Image: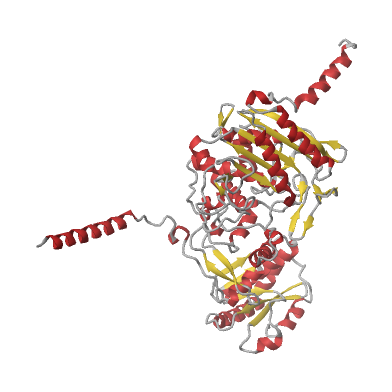
């Protein structure tokens, strides 16, 4: 082995040792996914107004409970994330981070556009005063259609078995649910039996 | 009791009451290497601002070598009420260094690490997203990208967490990112703490944690809501409400007896009013309640009205010049005052050295200033040439309050007024600090 070759071998060995040493110096990540759990992606997003009137917040709580109960009635428990901003909820749905959102009047597509399969579909399930609250489904999202079917079925179930009214009475007080509530709701959602 | 002694006792009692607040040792300026005739310039300067009705009043305190050499009130605190040495002020963002010291005490006790992710204390901050604006006309106007790293306690202390204030939208009206952040903050009810706020800091910070950040954590100096989040971290790590923690661990040991989040009713008359000034002689007392200057909102009554449950670590404190002097002197003494140690020397050194690398602390200065942990630190004299020394540290409050600690000269300068808007503050402070520095006579 000549000197040049020996030198090359030594240089190679040194580079290899440095590389190994470099790896040994690298520390484990201080913050790992395991620390906080993997990020859970919501199936449904909702938003809660901050600093709004207690009455408005009450409606938001009722709406959330109705949605959860409707899915529970058909054995489903989609992940629901309540965001502090309506803009973020809308973004989550249009960006397909979530397959549906609980939204109010401004979020619900018009009757004409909701019949268009290219548009979002919405199922009205509650009234805030006279204003409809709906579960609005993202278009072109594989999760949306099964969610919509499950929600429709579940909503029918809790409407029929009295759970829907129980939730309303729990929040509004027994005997405080407006007499014409059901009639007005059905105007927005004629499928409810 | 001898009736003839009664008037004499009354006079003595009244005198004692009048001097209780003045029971502060003020030395001859020359005893600490300051020149009296130069300090007279400070008085002339301040009186000029009051006479020109640019501001209603102020208190200025200058100390050197651990002794107060200049402590003067100017003008009026409120309509018909002269400013007093012990007048109280909304110190606003000068609350931030107080909260930073609280966090560093917990760091010294092993209750938190600077490298700890904030999500360890406030789970809503896990998996943060960063807001990126899309070209004008896009719908939606923004996209969210995952943060490259989690927000740490150090990011909060150095304002590199990507958490701006809502009123940045007012200061930078053409910046679409700030406009979008303002809109999201409004949606989520994020309070700057400068007005009466419902709920607790814990409630608000949870909502803030679910909003996107304005910058990638650790990549930009973005002054704003970080100290409010830090206040909540202090609550979680200590297991105490922020006001209780601050009282027990900082205000009480430092004998800062006039520093509060919410001022007791008995002390309300001492609180100076907030004045709106156009800097041209039009000076108006701002009434209680919410006051809006575009997207900047504040309420002068936040320290004494409302639910009093929201302890803003960013700007909630009320204090006096003397109390804040005691805090600043503790930092100048490397963590100790009158035999009471608040922080270790090593931690104060850490706090007052650059922690933001190549970034610049641009809130109060363009260049030449860095940021330590809760305070800005002067890095050179090339950019900020008017006054001060390399290593001097400081911070300010939005109602025109400021403090500066110059370790090299062992000098502290404190200026407290209650004037809005803040933009007028810069020239006044720069000149005042020059006068303070120029009074060094040794």
| Image location (x, y in percent) of residue B272 | 79, 40
Q: Does residue B267 appear in this view?
A: no
Name the quadrant containing residue A72: bottom right
Closest to the observer, B265 or A122: B265
Name the quadrant containing residue B10: top right
Q: Does residue A191 appear in this view?
A: yes
Point out the image quarter for the N terminus of chain A: bottom left
Q: Residue at x 27, y 58 (%)?
A: A20
Q: Is residue B6 above or below residue B244?
A: above
In the rendered structure, the answer to whether residue B356 lies left or right of residue B429 reads left
Closest to the observer, B41 or B256: B41
Q: Residue at x 64, y 35 (%)?
A: B412
Q: Residue at x 10, y 62 (%)?
A: A2
Name the quadrant containing residue A43: bottom right
In the rendered structure, the answer to whether residue B232 lies left or right of residue B45 reads left
Closest to the observer, B337 or B435: B435
| Image location (x, y in percent) of residue B55 | 80, 44
Q: Is residue B336 above or below residue B143?
A: above
| Image location (x, y in percent) of residue B4 | 90, 11
Q: Residue at x 72, y 31 (%)?
A: B39
Looking at this view, name the residue that lies furthest to the left: A1
Point out the image quarter for the C terminus of chain A: bottom right
| Image location (x, y in percent) of residue B70 | 71, 30
In the rendered structure, the answer to whether residue A181 lies left or right of residue A3 reads right
């Amino acid at each position: 082995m000549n000197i040049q070759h020996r030198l090359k071998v030594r240089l190679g060995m040194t580079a290899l040792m440095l590389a190994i040493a470099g790896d040994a110096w690298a520390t484990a990540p201080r913050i790992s996914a395991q620390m906080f759990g993997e990020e859970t992606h919501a199936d449904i997003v909702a938003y809660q107004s901050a600093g709004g009137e207690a009455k408005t917040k009450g409606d938001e709580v009722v709406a959330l409970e109705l949605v959860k109960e409707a899915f529970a009635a058909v054995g489903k428990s989609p992940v629901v994330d309540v965001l502090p901003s309506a803009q973020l909820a809308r973004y989550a749905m249009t960006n397909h981070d979530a397959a549906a959102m609980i939204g109010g009047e401004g979020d619900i597509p018009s009757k004409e556009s909701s019949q268009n399969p290219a548009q979002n579909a919405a199922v009205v399930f509650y009234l805030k005063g006279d204003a409809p609250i709906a579960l609005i489904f993202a278009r072109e999202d594989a999760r949306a259609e099964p969610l919509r079917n499950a929600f429709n079925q579940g909503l029918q179930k809790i409407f029929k078995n009295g759970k829907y009214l129980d939730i309303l009475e729990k929040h509004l007080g027994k005997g405080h649910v407006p007499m014409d509530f059901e009639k007005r709701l059905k105007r927005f959602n004629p499928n409810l039996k | 009791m001898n009736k003839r002694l009664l008037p004499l006792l009354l006079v003595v009692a009244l005198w004692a009451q009048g001097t209780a607040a003045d029971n502060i040792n003020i030395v001859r300026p020359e005893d600490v290497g300051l020149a009296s005739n130069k300090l007279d310039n400070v008085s002339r300067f301040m009186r000029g601002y009051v006479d020109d009705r640019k501001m209603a009043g102020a208190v200025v305190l200058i100390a050197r070598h651990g002794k107060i050499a200049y402590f003067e009130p100017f003008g009026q605190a409120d309509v018909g009420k002269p400013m007093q040495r012990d007048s109280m002020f909304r110190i606003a963002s000068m609350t931030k260094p107080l909260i930073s010291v609280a966090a560093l005490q917990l760091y010294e006790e092993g209750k938190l690490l600077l490298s700890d992710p904030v999500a360890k204390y406030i789970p809503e901050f896990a998996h943060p997203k960063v807001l990126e604006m899309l070209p004008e006309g896009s719908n939606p106007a923004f996209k969210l990208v995952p943060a490259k790293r989690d927000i740490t306690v150090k990011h909060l202390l150095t304002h590199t967490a990507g958490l701006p204030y809502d009123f940045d939208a007012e200061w930078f009206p053409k910046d679409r990112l700030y406009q979008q952040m303002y809109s999201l903050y409004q949606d989520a009810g994020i309070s700057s703490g400068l007005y009466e706020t419902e709920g607790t800091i814990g409630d608000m910070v949870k909502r803030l944690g679910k909003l996107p950040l304005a910058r990638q954590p650790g990549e930009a100096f973005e002054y704003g809501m970080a100290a409010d989040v830090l206040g909540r971290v202090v609550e979680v790590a200590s297991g105490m409400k922020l006001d209780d923690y601050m009282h027990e661990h900082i205000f009480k040991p430092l004998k800062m007896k006039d520093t509060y989040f919410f001022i007791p009713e008995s002390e309300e008359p001492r609180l100076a009013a907030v004045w709106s000034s156009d800097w041209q002689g039009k000076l108006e007392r701002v009434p209680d309640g919410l006051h809006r200057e575009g997207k900047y909102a504040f309420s002068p009554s936040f320290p004494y009205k409302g639910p009093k449950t929201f302890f803003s670590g960013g700007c909630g404190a009320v204090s006096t010049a003397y109390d804040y002097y005691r805090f600043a002197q503790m930092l100048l003494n490397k963590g100790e005052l009158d035999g009471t140690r608040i922080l270790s020397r090593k931690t104060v050194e850490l706090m007052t050295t650059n922690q933001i690398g190549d970034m610049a602390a641009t809130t109060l200065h363009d260049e030449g200033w860095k940021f330590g942990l809760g305070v800005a630190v002067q890095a050179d004299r090339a950019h900020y040439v008017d006054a001060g020394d390399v290593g001097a540290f400081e911070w300010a409050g939005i109602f025109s309050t400021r403090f500066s600690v110059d370790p090299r000269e062992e000098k502290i300068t404190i200026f407290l007024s209650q004037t809005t808007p803040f933009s007028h503050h810069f020239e006044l402070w720069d000149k005042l600090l020059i006068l303070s520095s120029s009074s060094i006579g040794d």
